[in-house]
Image (tube, rainbow, N blue to C red):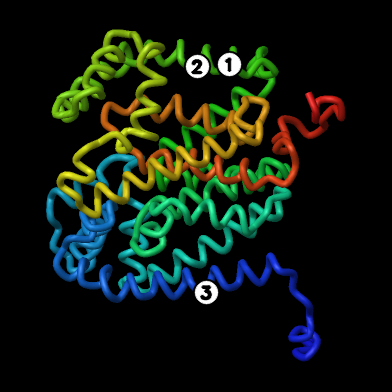
Amino acid sequence: MTVDVLRVLKMRMGVGSWILVVLLIAYFAFTFVIFFQAVIPSYEDGTTSWTFAVDSTVYVYMADSIREGRNEPWVLGAFASFPNTVMTPVAIALVLNSAFLVMLANYAVLAISVLLFRLTFSISTIAFLVLLLLNPTTTTSILCVNKEILDLFVISLFLFARVKRFRLLLLVALVLALVNRWETCAIMITYLIAESRLNPWRERRGLTLLLLVGALNFVPIVGAEVLAKRFEEAEYAGVIRVLDILQLHYLYFIAVIPKIADNLFGQLPNPQVWKTPSSWLFINFFNNAAAAILILINMAKGRFTLRSDFIYLGAFGSVLLAQSLVVQPRYFYFVYILLCLEAAEKKSRSPLLARSPIRQPELQHA
């Protein structure tokens, strides 16, 4: 197969495409400057985790320990159970063994994910990328070895396989989610069950969410020791500690919305952001600000509703993720991606994700 280079060069691009190209080139250049001026030095002095609000320093140290055969107990102990939260980022750092190659790999994952979203939904690529890059978590996920960039890929693969009805690919997405961040896998599996014939109330989404919250009220019964230990680790927190007490006393239905709000917006009223500024606080502050902006955009468009599959899946994820007894804003990056998809959707409503091989046409606009 031959490519007519002159024909390619003569192809006309719309104004929107040119804007996207210019923005991407500018962003690409910006991240390269940040990478060499800040990321590389932070790896050298071991401050990447604090400077960019990611655990990259830990992952790289663990990869170096394994590569050098130091057999440190705490490193080996981190892999003693499955699933765990270090496997994929440590494996990436171990295999690539280069911060620069990690950044290039992250860019490749970003490009593939966006392509999968475009193949799955009718979205504005410009709007989606602008909104995605509005959140500094996206930039730090590109610059450093982490789990969030793989979360983006897992979501794109899951939605692509779900809509196109590729069952094997759906299984691959679930396995990858399990290995990377088991909470994301739990969200996906719970969502699939809720949207299947196993749930007689699958058409009543509000009721399904209420039943999920009700079921999670009994988590302390089956996991009291684990929750109690995590509660001890979270006792330094203020509001979240009160909410955790409610959760441990089977009142999760009261605590769930405040806990979700604390993860999504908790840093916005935090005076320490300006009194004792740090990159960690700024990143999480603007992470929360971006989430607030996305929610307002979707509300203004009349799309912040459970009738949207993106919002419904995000609500499912939020209810499950809020079970954590510590604030984990980065875990909610999963929800942020879904908000971006909803806001960038060209149609008035996101297409329903297929629940069965054959769909009734009238349900597509129910």
| Front-most of residues 176 and 304 | 304
Residue 228 placement, left or right of 328 = left
Q: Are marks 2 and 1 in contact (CB under 8 Å)?
A: yes
Q: Quadrant of the C terminus?
A: top right
x 41%, y 62%: residue: 142
Of the two numbered discs 3 and 2 in the rendering, the one whose residue sits closer to the viewer: 3
Pointer 3 and pointer 1: residues touching (CB < 8 Å)?
no
Amino acid under disc 2: Leu
The residues bearing labels 3 and 1 have C-alpha atoms spaced at a distance of 44 Å
Q: Secondary structure at mark 2?
A: helix
Q: Residue at x 86, y 25 (%)?
A: 362
Residue with the mark numbered 2: 212
Residue at the spot 21% in from the left edge and 21% down from the top edge: 241
**Could you tell me which secondary element the residue under label 3 belongs to?**
helix
Q: Is residue 83 above or below residue 191?
A: below
Question: Which residue occupies the foreground of this view, 276 or 109?
Answer: 276
On residue 25, which mark appears? Answer: 3
Please state which of the two labelled residues, at mark 3 or mark 1, is closer to the viewer: 3
Residue 100 position within the rendered picture, expressed as x and y whole percent measured from the top left: 35, 74
Count residues near mark 3 (Cα–Cα under 10 Å), then give few for <14, some for 14-19, many for 20+: few
Relative to 106, say whether 178 is above or below. above
- When asked about the image quadrant of residue 191, the answer is top right
